[in-house]
Amino acid sequence: MSQKVAEPPTQPAFVIRPAKRRELEDLIEVYKSGYEGLEEYAERTEEDIRDYLEWLYDGDPNGFLVAEANGELIGFVSVHSDWWDRRYQRRTAEIHELVVRKDWQSKGVGRALMMAALDYARAQGCDYASLWVGEGNWKAREWYRRLGFEEVGKGWSVWVRMVKKLRDEL
């Protein structure tokens, strides 16, 4: 009698790589998809999203990374590696945006993007990474905590500040 061996779960194939300026237009739909249900924290018009993506890219082109699967963009992260945190008076890698297309969420894309962003920040000599997350975005807040971020304050009425040490000796 033969025994059926369970197939290992398949992991969706995607790659993380630096973004190209010409891809920003394609990221508008990724952005809109990723913010479904969280619109209160998002840019609302395509023009505003486009301007925001250009600002993110121009701030640190090497820190703007995309996730791609089968030739389609499915997520992105933007980290500015030379950001000054006035509140804490220190240089930080500011993670301005991490967005994954709705149909690719909970498949490891966000984690891969975040790990790539943190690796980039460390390579740039950053000791801390920081971000703002929507106060009511409990799923993201918990996810960031699991990745080692700590909540350190609030600002602009609906945002929570989170920080992560990037080096053990700090």
Image (cartoon, helix red, strand yellow):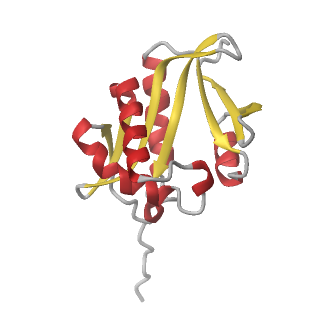
Question: Which quadrant does the N terminus fall into?
Answer: bottom left
Q: Where does the image place residue 107, in percent across and percent down from the top left?
A: 48, 58
Q: Where does the image place residue 26, in percent across and percent down from the top left?
A: 29, 51
At 62% from the left edge and 53% from the top edge, which residue is drawn? 40
At 50% from the left edge and 59% from the top edge, which residue is drawn? 105
Residue 20 visible? The answer is: no
Question: Which quadrant does the C terminus fall into?
Answer: top right
Left or right: residue 17 compared with residue 7: left
At 75% from the left edge and 39% from the top edge, which residue is drawn? 157
**Quadrant housing residue 58:** top left
Left or right: residue 65 compared with residue 40: left
Q: Is residue 82 above or below residue 138?
A: above
Left or right: residue 151 compared with residue 80: right
Q: Nearer the viewer, residue 146 or 89?
A: 89
Residue 49 visible? The answer is: yes
Q: Where does the image place residue 62, in percent across and percent down from the top left?
A: 34, 26
Q: Is residue 3 above or below residue 116?
A: below
Q: Is residue 143 above or below residue 54?
A: below
